[in-house]
Amino acid sequence: MEIEAFYDDATSTLTYVVFDPESRDAIVIDPVLDYDPASSEISHVSVDRVSVFLRKRELELRLILETHAHADHLSGSQVLKRRFPAAQTGIGAKITVVQAIFKDVFDLPADFPTDGRQFDRLLHDGEVVEAGTLRFQVIATPGHTPGCVSYLFEDALFTGDAMFMPDMGTGRCDFPAGSAEDLYDSITKRIYTLPDETRIFVGHDYQPGGRALAYQTTVAEQKATNKQLPADRSREAFVEFRTKRDATLSAPKLLFQSVQVNVDAGALPDPASNQTRYLKIPINAFRPQPEDPSAIVGETV
């Protein structure tokens, strides 16, 4: 088994290709669809890089996996699936919880499914999945979102946004149905109980202090040096820290564009009657709105 990483500078996202060089079976984890919020334009630079690699190595793409419904980039899964029709999409089974939440936030059509059927496979905690000669275990790691999962291939764990490099810490927990308590349990009871030599591949790297890109660490390194959750930190201390920290964070700049696409398995909205696709951007979606709209002072839209 080999692993190839692709970094998207615009969203600091890591996409991974896990492949068997002998059988040429491959799985892609967390592909990115490029989106410019200023012009509202879609491009395929990130997906193209992955596609070129797959074709150059003559790999057979079996699965396109999401660690969760991302809030900082649009998923490139549907573009990859069109290019590699034999591939299936997969995500943690609790995507249904996230779909139900955001169906209301975006006032999606009444017939928008919240049973996860947009994805080819809903993956359950503890499930062992085979894709050609590749094999991995699904490990539920909720907290950042209720539907987050990590994927364990041999000694390599892909954690999505549950954990970052040790000098960055953990994912935030202030999205709807996120939970610092759940994230603490996910990390300490599901990740830190794996063998110390287990390699961890993170979902983002924001290169703190301007350091070079880094995306691979180990369970031992995380337990010893994770700045937010070393192994000896108590649940109460972490929850207090994470809650206060999250209260200071701005929303991801692509939060609403990303989530409404990603809960639909990376599908863009259907064209309107004028054949143009539109994304919905709610106003004050997660805080109470005044009864009198004229009471909103000093806000720009």
Image: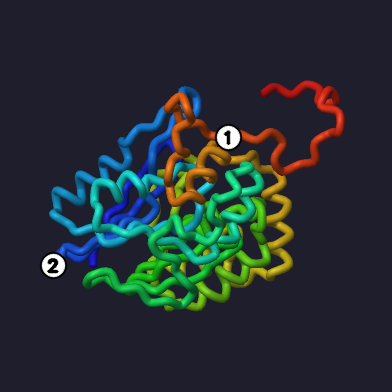
Say left or right for 45 vs 14: left
Seen at 31% across and 61% down, the residue is: 63
Tell me if label 1 and label 2 are in contact, CB under 8 Å. Answer: no
- The quarter of the picture where residue 158 lies is bottom left
In this view, 184 is above or below 73:
below
Does residue 227 appear to the left or right of 28 in the view shown? right
Rendered location of residue 266, percent (x, y): 43, 47
Q: Which residue is mark 2?
A: 22
Task: State the residue at coordinates (84%, 33%).
Answer: 290
* Disc 1 crowd, CA 10 A, few/some/many (<14, 14-19, 20+): few
Residues 146 and 20: in front is 146
* 200 w.r.t. 107: above or below: below
Residue at 68% from the left image edge and 50% from the top image edge: 245
Query: In the rendered image, which quarter contains the N terminus?
Result: bottom left
Marks 1/2: CA distance? 45 Å
Q: Which is nearer the eye, 61 or 253? A: 61
The amino acid marked with disc number 2 is: Glu
Q: Closer to the observer: label 1 or label 2?
A: 1
Where is residue 209 shown, x and y percent of the image?
50, 41
Q: Which residue is mark 1?
A: 280
- Asked if residue 201 can be seen in this view, the reply is no
The secondary element bearing badge 2 is classed as loop
Considering the numbered disc 1 on the image, is that residue within a helix, a strand or a loop?
loop
Q: Position of residue 277 (x, y in %)?
A: 46, 31
Residue 237 seen from this side: yes
Q: Amino acid at mark 1?
A: Lys
10 Å crowding of disc 2: few (<14), some (14-19), many (20+)? few
